[in-house]
Amino acid sequence: MLIQPDDSPGENAPGGKDLRNQAGEIMAYMKANNYDVIDAGETITFRGLIQRSTSQAFFLVFCTALGMASLALVLQIQFQDLGESLFLRVTWNVSKDASR
């Protein structure tokens, strides 16, 4: 992912910071958000330290599905005239939203 640099006021602008101070602030921000410096040449390259977790993704999908099933059950109890189709409607809407 390439992040374009933001413009910031230079040393001579009112309220501007010198280059060393700006670089220190950016470095501290990236280190605090679990990024490490890969290359520190003319362009500084950061890489995230946290790896993807498939088990966490499966857990989030499971919790979402359980929550939507609970919502369908509550709606089925509340609106009994709609019948059993609420489970299918909620599942259909969730699957349409997930495919976007």
Image (cartoon, rainbow, N blue to C red):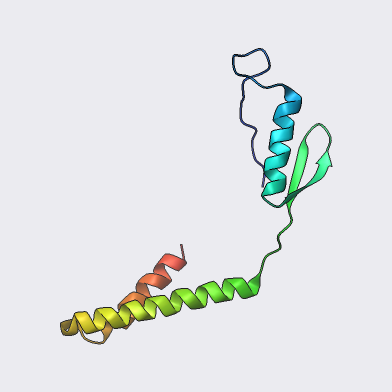
**Residue 46 on image: x %, y %:** 74, 45
x 46%, y 67%: residue: 98
Residue positioned most to the left: 81
User: On the picture, is 6 further left or further right than 95?
Assistant: right
For residue 69, what is the image quadrant?
Answer: bottom left
x 65%, y 40%: residue: 3
Q: Nearer the viewer, residue 86 or 49?
A: 49
For residue 56, what is the image quadrant?
Answer: bottom right
**Residue 70 on image: x %, y %:** 36, 80
**Residue 85 on image: x %, y %:** 27, 83
Relative to 25, say whether 14 is above or below: above
User: On the picture, is 68 further left or further right than 32?
Assistant: left
Relative to 34, say whether 77 is above or below: below
**Residue 13 on image: x %, y %:** 62, 14
Q: Nearer the viewer, residue 23 or 61?
A: 23
User: On the picture, is 25 further left or further right than 70?
Assistant: right
x 67%, y 47%: residue: 1
x 81%, y 31%: residue: 42
Relative to 12, say whether 22 is above or below: below
Relative to 38, say whether 90 is above or below: below
For residue 9, what is the image quadrant?
Answer: top right
What count of labels does the image hold? 0
